Image (tube, rainbow, N blue to C red):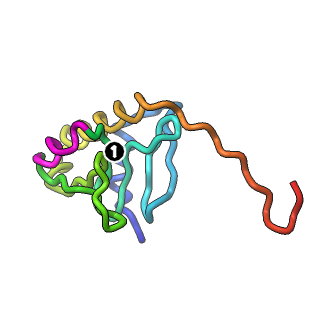
Amino acid sequence: MAYDETLAQRIRETVGPRPDVAERKMFGGLCFTTGGNMFAGVVKDELMVRIDKADHEASLLKPGARPMDFTGRTMTGMLFVGAPGIETDASLSSWVRQAYDFASSLPAKQAKAKLAPRGRKA
């Protein structure tokens, strides 16, 4: 599944150079993380954001926002934002800043130890 590279570049420009931000390909798209916590991403041509669960219902009232139902279940605190909500740099920046601020308030994830490939001893 391809993702919108133009939207990914707009997110990169919004975030700017930050040593705490990393990109990972996942969900068939691209995710942006801080401290190992996902805060934004691109799935097809939509923005995916992680926000505080307390802000979920109010955020759904914003243009282009809809619940993230990637697995068939709504995930509170996760939203997809379509074109009407990210047309301008200001609207995209607002979503990305909200998501980054929330994710950076979470404890950093510890790096997982890598397992040796099957059939080999570590």
What residue appears at the point 11 percent right and 50 percent down from the top-left corner?
A: 63
| Badge 1: residue crowd in 10 Å (few <14, some 14–19, many ≥20) | many
User: Which structural element holds mark 1?
Assistant: strand
- Among the 4 quarters of the image, the one containing residue 27: bottom left
- Among the 4 quarters of the image, the one containing residue 111: top right
Question: In the rendered image of this protein, does residue 48 appear above or below residue 36?
Answer: below
State the predominant SS element of the stretch in magenta: helix
What residue appears at the point 41 percent right and 68 percent down from the top-left corner?
A: 2
**Residue 23 pos. (x, y %):** 50, 47
- The residue beneath circle 1 is 50
Q: Quadrant of the N terminus?
A: bottom left
Start-end of magenta stretch: 54-61
Task: Name the foreground residue: 63 vs 73.
Answer: 73
Residue 60 lies within the magenta run: yes
- Among the 4 quarters of the image, the one containing residue 43: bottom left
What residue appears at the point 27 percent right and 51 percent down from the top-left corner?
A: 79
Relative side of 120 to 12, left or right: right
Q: Residue furthest bottom?
A: 1
Relative side of 87 to 72, left or right: left
Q: Residue furthest top?
A: 105
Amino acid carrying label 1: it is Arg
What residue appears at the point 51 percent right and 35 percent down from the top-left corner?
A: 35
Tag count in the figure? 1
Task: Name the foreground residue: 5 vs 1.
Answer: 1
Q: Quadrant of the C terminus?
A: bottom right
Question: In the rendered image of this protein, does residue 53 appear above or below residue 105?
Answer: below
**Residue 73 pos. (x, y %):** 31, 63
Relative side of 24 to 57, left or right: right
**Residue 113 pos. (x, y %):** 71, 46
Relative side of 24 to 103, left or right: right
Residue 78 lies within the magenta run: no
